[in-house]
Image: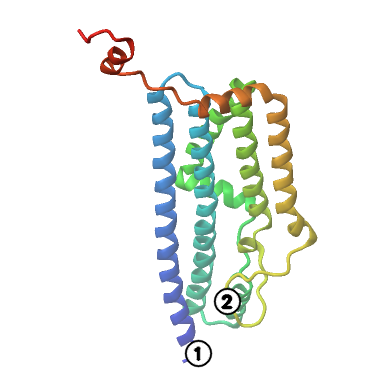
Amino acid sequence: MKQSWVQDFYHECGREISLSLTNLHTISSWTITAGIGLISALVLLGDFPNVASYGLLALGAILLLRFFVRSLLAYDNLERWNRLQRAALTYLQDSTSGNLNNLQSLIESLYRRWRSPLSRWELIRANAVLTGSGYVLLAVLSIFVYAAVALRREWEAQLITVGALAVLIWELYWLVNSHHFTMESTGTKFGPEKTTASKMRRVAVPLLALTVFLAATAIVWQNGSAVRSAIDQALDRETPAPSPKATAIETGVPKP
């Protein structure tokens, strides 16, 4: 009877491991497929880099980065439940007080307080190597840097770069400060809970938005004539050419 709850917990860990593996496999497959598809599209479009292809590349890089960060959660859960299951199995095989204390300690840390078993750097490195998605993401980001340097004098590309860097900074900030990896839960509720945001967290979003706005404004201000020309061309509608019948009526010349 003393081991019954440990046996139930052991089987629950197995189900969670299976779910984490499925999520990790799905996200990693999407990342690799989307990355290879993006690179192939750039090759087929030709004339790379240009502003249009650079915009497509920036959007693809942002999506791939989001997929990769999301896969970190799945890998983190996989590590968490693997360690809990191993501790439960150790106790079932050798029901000593030391093994029980170790299991209860891991449950308190990894389950109740939802601590991450790996540091963020270890998590990124292990996930990138295990799934292979890190190589695709690195390739896309390298192409993005190359295109950004090549198109650095184009104001449209400068705006795209500012927007992409803003998303990159936000993803890094979320990764460093996310409660999913470092949260201490309270009470009896399991899983991560949100806590009162620090002053830095409260000002991070407005500060990032203000920085992006000022950078975009500066780019538009420095390239005012080019921006106005682009807007005029976008709004200018060509007058349709008159039909031969209408031309004949206006000039009085019979239609041949």
Horizontal arrangement in the rendering, residue 48 relative to residue 252 (left or right): right
Q: Residues within 10 Å of mark 2 (few under 14, many from 20)?
A: few
Q: Tell me if 25 is positioned left or right of 87 in this view.
A: left
Relative height, residue 222 to residue 205 (above, below): above
**Which corner quadrant of the image does residue 169 belong to?**
top right
Would you place residue 83 above or below residue 100 in this image? above
Identify the amino acid type marked 1. Answer: Lys
Element carrying mark 2: loop
Who's the residue at 49% across and 70% down the image? 85
Residue 116 visible to the viewer: no
Within-10-Å neighbours for mark 1: few <14, some 14–19, many 20+: few
User: In the rendering, at what x and y percent does residue 254 appear?
Assistant: 23, 9
The colour scheme of the drawn protein is rainbow
Name which quarter of the figure residue 97 lies in: bottom right
Residue situated in front as seen by the camera: 223 or 52: 223
Instruction: Please name the residue that numbered disc 2 is placed on.
Output: 190
Q: Residue at x 57, y 46 (%)?
A: 125
Residue 156, given in percent of the width and then of the height, sits at 59, 28
For this orientation, the residue located farthest to the bottom is 1
Q: On screen, 252 above or below 6?
A: above
Q: Residue 155: percent from the left, percent from the top?
A: 63, 26
Q: Residue at x 68, y 51 (%)?
A: 173
- Rounded to the nearest angstrom, the CA distance separating label 1 from label 2 is 23 Å
Q: Which residue is mark 1?
A: 2
